[in-house]
Amino acid sequence: MELIVCIKRVPQTAEAEVKIDDSGKDIVKDRLTFDMNEADSYALEEAILLKEKFGGAITAVSLGTAEAEDTLRIALAKGADNAIRIKAEEFGELDGYKTAMIIKEAIKDLKFDAIFTGCMATDDSYYQVGPVLAETLGVPHATLVSKIELTDKKVHVNRELEGGLIEHLEMSLPAVFAVQTGINEPRYASLIAIRRAAAKEIKVLGKDDIASEPKLNSTLEELFVPPVGKRAEFLTGTADEVSARTAEIIKEKGLI
């Protein structure tokens, strides 16, 4: 099988203090650590599992700056065979649609049986890349994929819906799969594999290698930190005092 995995290098902000920079359109990244987008690591693992079962090769693709090559080398160390970096610095402002269209131009001449993406990017929360890739390449797709089974040239896919429901799809290849976190357990790259990956070539494509630069489908106007909402109130004191205060709060809220 010929497999393509789209990966993104993103800042880890879950436990960090996020500050908006002077432009108002980005965050201060000086003290942040970067890693592979969480959902993309599951997408990569799913591709590796298929490669191990059916053979073939995996090409990891990333639209990013030169630092994204570190993330691509981790993908190579885990099991990808080839890597392509598209120079994000040459394309100005990006959104989900423009990102997908640039990647599409970079991979449209590659033979593939399946393309894997993460279901979303943790830095900008875009969900568009997988579906836009599929539509513009003219192949079927599934999003929020939680299970993939390949039998007799048919792919059986489970995808998560609202309310805890699971949808089952039968699809034909080639196809695009936007993978949900938790579908598998991503492996770690060994030190030996990381050293070997450091010597592998990463193909770099620029603006001149793309047929035409797609237009933005949206424009970022401003970033801001969400305002602090109402906080929880912890009640202390004796049982009678807590009960009395609880009754007061209920009355204040107009519940009785």
Image (cartoon, grey):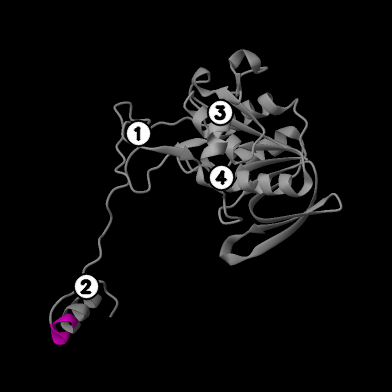
Disc 2 on helix, strand or loop? helix
Above or below residue 206? Residue 238 is: below
Of the numbered discs 3 and 2, the one sitting upstream in the chain is 3
Mark 3, mark 2: which one is toward the viewer? Answer: 3
User: Which image quadrant is residue 167 in?
Assistant: bottom right
- Which residue is farthest top? 208
Which residue is the site of mark 4? Answer: 41
Q: Amino acid at mark 4?
A: Ser
Where is residue 221 shown, x and y percent of the image? 40, 31
Image spot of residue 31 (x, y percent): 31, 35
Q: Looking at the image, is mark 2 or mark 4 earlier in the sequence?
A: 4
Q: Amino acid at mark 1?
A: Ile
Q: Which residue corresponds to the image point at 17% horizontal and 81% vertical from the top-left?
A: 242
Kindly state the secondary structure of the residue where label 1 is placed: loop
Residue at mark 3 to residue at mark 4: CA–CA distance: 16 Å
Q: Residues within 10 Å of mark 4 (few under 14, many from 20)?
A: many
Where is the N terminus found, in terms of image quarters?
A: top right
Mark 1 to mark 4 CA distance (whole Å): 23 Å
User: Which callout, 3 or 1, points at the residue further toward the start of the chain?
Assistant: 1
Left or right for 183, reference 245: right
Q: In the rendered structure, which amino acid carries the disc numbered 3?
A: Leu
As helix, strand or loop, the secondary structure at mark 4 comes to helix
Question: Which of the marked residues, 1 or 2, is nearer the chain's N terminus?
Answer: 1
Q: Nearer the viewer, residue 128 or 58?
A: 58
Q: Which residue is identified by label 3?
A: 63
Q: Which residue is mark 2?
A: 252
Q: Percent x, y for residue 72?
A: 56, 32
Going by the picture, which residue comes out furthest to the right? 152
